[in-house]
Amino acid sequence: MTPARRAVVIGGGPAGLMAAETLAAAGIAVDVYDAMSNCGRKFLIAGKGGLNLTHAEAFPSFVARYGSRAERWQPMLEAFGADHLRDWARGLGIETFVGSSQRVFPSDLKAAPLLRAWLRRLREAGVHFHLRHRWTGWDETGALRFDAPDGPVNVTSDATVLALGGGSWRRLGSDGRWTATLASRGIDIAPLQPSNCGFESGWTAIMRERSAGQPIKPVAARLAPAQGGDGVFHQGEFIFTSVGVEGSLIYALSAPLRDAINRHGYAELELDLLPGTPLDKLTAKLSLPRGKQSMAKHLHRCGLDGVKAAVLRECAPEDAFDDPARLALAIKQLTVRLTRTRPIDEAISTTGGVRFEAVDTRLMLQALPSVFCAGEMLDWEAPTGGYLLTACFASGRAAGLGAAEWLGAAPTAKS
């Protein structure tokens, strides 16, 4: 009798669980190992404020969100994209809706019911879970090694899917330790860096005291064209912190800002503090005589006060306040110098990891046949808004299909 084919999935986040589901559907015995006490911890935390599962954006624009790696992501997202993900959730009894920003959420906004239903279905499909098992590499025979509650454990497998996450949110299990393990096996690893992250700036004490924790909106921002920015202002909002800036608009620009810091040692974030007011009209307003009015009152009359006035005072040249034209330009194109990213453990996600050149089209490591990679441990990045989760699901499915093919199994149509 031919022994049953067995696959091991290491990592119990969305990518790993989707790989496990795909393998089980192909008739393969699957064991999932995770270092934490329960699966999907980062998934649950990310969904506390409302689980942004995917995005309803048109497919060409959706794929473009993956930047330089869009070409590699396109076939995986064509096979399992936003619509597929919504149908999959419906199969678990979870309906979804499209919000005003085209973001897609479960109808109750919660992550826990979806995860519970998914884990129940996986167990019913025969998937076995081994928690508090931290993967430490391979032994001399090629068996997988784990540190478990009762001591070291060695596990053999016909195929292995690694879905170990990136390097952010260490307390939830994504600590990036695996990079050294794979690098020692000759796998090409790009250094992990923060993505969708905040940045630091050298605020004065006055700015820290008056503005820390304050939101700024509406505002538009871009990386300075002189540093390689595309010249396009993106409108949104963000928050001033005691050390710098963070929030949705900053996260959307985090990749070019981070790369500028890597190249130049700093990044020039340009702000349009009054995105709804054209430069010529603003110049005309500022040119009106202010008589005995203070500059603060004058700026207020033009629609600029509070935290916007504070950052203008912080970053604009002092002599710009003596020239309406220069002041108007400063308001419409205020430069904030950012000196570094916030620590990687604070980032929403990371870039870096296993380079796509190190895996084949099935996501199998070319230097380690039978070992597949999925999710955030691959070298890619995307903005928040459902793009991160969708790619984790899509790559988990692709790795599961790749492993099933490697094992000679024929995945069912349900896969």
Image (cartoon, rainbow, N blue to C red):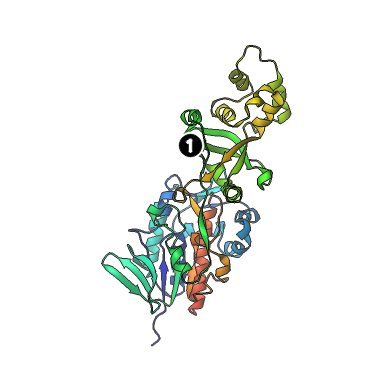
Identify whether 369 is placed above or below 1.
above
- The answer to which image quadrant residue 115 occupies is bottom left
At 41% from the left edge and 49% from the top edge, which residue is drawn?
A: 45
- The single residue placed furthest to the left in the displayed view is 150
Residue located 66% across and 46% down the image? 227
Rendered location of residue 278, percent (x, y): 70, 31
For the point 44% across and 56% down, which residue is it?
93
Q: Residue furthest bottom?
A: 1
Residue 182 location (% of width, % of height): 46, 68
Q: Position of residue 29 (x, y in %)?
A: 40, 74
Vertical relation: 132 (above or below) 94: below
Residue in the foreground of this view, choosing between 203 and 392: 203
**Is residue 414 visible to the viewer in this orientation of the structure?**
no
Which one is nearer the viewer's eye here, 210 or 100?
A: 210
SS at badge 1:
loop
Residue 286, quarter of picture: top right
Q: Residues within 10 Å of mark 1 (few under 14, many from 20)?
A: many
Q: Can residue 83 be seen here? A: yes
The one nearer the camera, 116 or 7, is 7
Residue 179 percent location from the top left of the image: 46, 63
The residue pinned by badge 1 equals 241
Instruction: Answer above or below: position of 313 versus 387.
Output: above
Rendered-image quadrant of the N terminus: bottom left
**Callout 1, which amino acid?**
Thr
Front one among 245 and 412: 245
